[in-house]
């Protein structure tokens, strides 16, 4: 939005923090209207929606802001370090195979959802899924498949491989942003109804509850009133690790790109591994897990995961900034394809969860690890409990691994469905 009222990031950040403060103040009310309101609408969803409303009304403009970049590159890895500081790795592995099954069922939902969406839309609006040569819609949809299975690096790879018309690419980015953000809003809404959904799924969430209890019991056993040195040391650990993660990510990414053509070639299925963001998230998480085997783990008692949660909520607000609610009406045909496609993804996730009796946690995080990637999967996981953020990161890593391969398979099927 070129004519946004506020374009100074200091002002925009102030607005976001006021919004977060408002949500936390009202959601902490024990009676009256707000108690009833938050029993229906989760607080985390409001932290996401208020910035989206600011953006939609033209108060702020995500495109001219650096806040999402700062939050995703600095605060997210810092949060991951603080949240994994007290992780019980054995308990994470005890969660069993259901997390992976749900992740891959989400991937399958994207792979078959694309061609099915084309077939369904083509029955009453064939021009929406048409186009020839570089303008063919299936070529453009390949970039969405890359984004929804892996992430931005996989999306860029698909644009290179299938050579979609760059002048039309903005329309595909629009579909990606609108539909992915609507999905995230829906998943956050579901978190407020986790118990009801789990009862309907007949899910066994005992392993998740055990992990939460173990972390909570440990935190209670080491809880102390934090002093200024505690905060400074926790911030030093977090942002020192962020610095190391950025350094390592830059070095690894540059080395792979310079020495291996398979990583530097944007048309290669392995090009996503040259993404510095991927390595930054991976290294930060590894450092946090490393800290969990040392005495630094005791800083959970001083509020390490609470500090990490603050960073996560700021990230949620900046993600919300990216959503312009008015964009839903800009290209209804393409948005329709995206919504049908995402609906198939969600239906397959719920069917799989029902069959294997997987908890809603695995469904939500498995979906977001595909569609949202490393930036939002830990956000959704941490909404259940800060100790679960690592599960989101680990699943998102799988997204990077299978992203381009899955997107290529999706595109082949979409090309067939489009009759090209």
Image: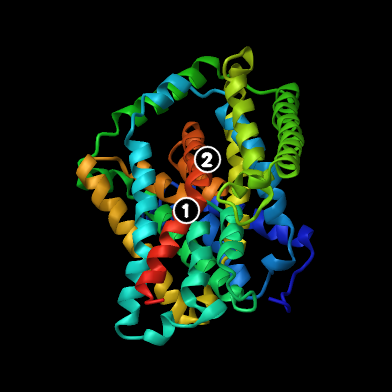
| Residue under the image location 54 percent in, 76 percent down | 327
Compare residues 396 and 413 and report the one nearer the observer: 413
Q: Could you say where residue 189 lies in the image, as x and y percent from the top left?
A: 40, 55
On screen, 315 above or below 332? above
**Which disc number belongs to residue 149?**
1
Left or right: residue 396 compared with residue 367 = right
Name the quarter where the C terminus is drawn. Answer: bottom left
Q: Residue furthest top?
A: 295
**Which disc number belongs to residue 252?**
none
Which of the 4 image quarters holds residue 418? Answer: bottom left
Left or right: residue 350 compared with residue 369 = left
Can residue 218 be seen in the rendering of this structure?
Answer: yes
Can residue 303 be seen in the rendering of this structure?
Answer: no
| Residue under the image location 49 percent in, 31 percent down | 387
Of marks 1 and 2, which one's residue comes earlier in the chain?
1
- The crowding category of the residue bearing disc 1, from other C-alpha atoms within 10 Å (few below 14, some 14 to 19, many at least 20), is many
Q: CA distance from mark 1 to mark 2?
A: 11 Å
Q: Could you say where residue 43 lies in the image, as x and y percent from the top left?
A: 48, 52
Compare residues 167 and 368 and report the one nearer the observer: 167
Left or right: residue 269 compared with residue 41 = right
Which of the 4 image quarters holds residue 308? Answer: top right
| Residue under the image location 61 percent in, 53 percent down | 153
Compare residues 222 and 270 and report the one nearer the observer: 270
Q: Which residue is mark 2?
A: 397
Q: Could you say where residue 222 lies in the image, as x and y percent from the top left?
A: 55, 16
On screen, 140 above or below 279? below
Q: Secondary structure at mark 1?
A: helix
| Residue under the image location 64 percent in, 32 percent down | 283
Name the quarter where the N terminus is drawn. Answer: bottom right
- The crowding category of the residue bearing disc 2, from other C-alpha atoms within 10 Å (few below 14, some 14 to 19, many at least 20), is many
Which of the 4 image quarters holds residue 247? Answer: top right
Q: Secondary structure at mark 2?
A: helix
């Amino acid at each position: 939005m070129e004519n946004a009222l506020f374009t100074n990031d200091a002002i925009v950040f102030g607005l976001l923090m006021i919004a977060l403060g408002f949500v936390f103040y009202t959601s902490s009310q024990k009676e009256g209207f707000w108690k009833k309101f938050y029993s229906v609408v989760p607080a985390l969803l409001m932290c996401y929606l208020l910035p989206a409303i600011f953006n939609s009304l033209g108060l702020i403009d995500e495109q001219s802001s650096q806040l999402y970049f700062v939050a995703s590159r600095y605060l997210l890895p810092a949060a991951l370090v603080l949240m994994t500081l007290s992780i019980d790795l054995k308990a994470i592995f005890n969660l069993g195979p259901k997390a992976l099954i749900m992740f891959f069922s989400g991937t399958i939902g994207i792979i078959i959802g694309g061609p099915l969406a084309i077939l369904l839309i083509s029955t009453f609006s064939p021009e929406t899924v048409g186009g020839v040569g570089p303008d063919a819609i299936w070529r453009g949809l390949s970039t969405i498949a890359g984004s929804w299975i892996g992430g931005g690096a996989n999306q860029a790879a698909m644009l290179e491989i299938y050579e979609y018309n760059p002048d039309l690419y903005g329309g595909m980015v629009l579909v990606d942003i609108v539909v992915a953000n609507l999905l995230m809003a829906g998943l956050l809404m579901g978190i407020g109804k986790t118990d009801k959904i789990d009862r309907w799924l007949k899910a066994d969430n005992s392993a998740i509850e055990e992990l939460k209890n173990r972390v909570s019991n440990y935190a209670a056993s080491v809880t102390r009133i934090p002093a200024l040195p505690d905060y400074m040391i926790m911030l030093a650990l977090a942002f020192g690790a962020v610095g190391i993660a950025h350094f390592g990510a830059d070095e690894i990414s540059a080395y792979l790109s310079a020495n291996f053509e398979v990583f530097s070639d944007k048309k290669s299925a392995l090009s996503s591994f040259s993404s510095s963001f991927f390595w930054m998230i991976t290294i930060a998480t590894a450092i946090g897990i490393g800290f969990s085997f040392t005495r630094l783990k005791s800083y959970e008692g001083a509020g390490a995961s609470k500090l990490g949660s603050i960073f996560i909520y700021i990230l949620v607000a900046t993600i919300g900034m990216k959503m312009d609610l008015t964009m839903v009406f800009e290209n209804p045909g393409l948005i329709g394809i995206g919504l049908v496609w995402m609906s198939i993804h969600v239906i397959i996730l719920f069917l799989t969860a029902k069959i294997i009796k997987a908890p809603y946690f695995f469904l939500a995080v498995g979906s977001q690890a595909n569609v949202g990637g490393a930036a939002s999967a830990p956000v959704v996981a941490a909404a259940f409990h800060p100790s679960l953020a690592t599960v989101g990161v680990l699943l998102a890593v799988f997204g990077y691994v299978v992203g381009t391969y899955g997107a290529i398979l999706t595109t082949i099927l979409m090309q067939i469905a489009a009759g090209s």
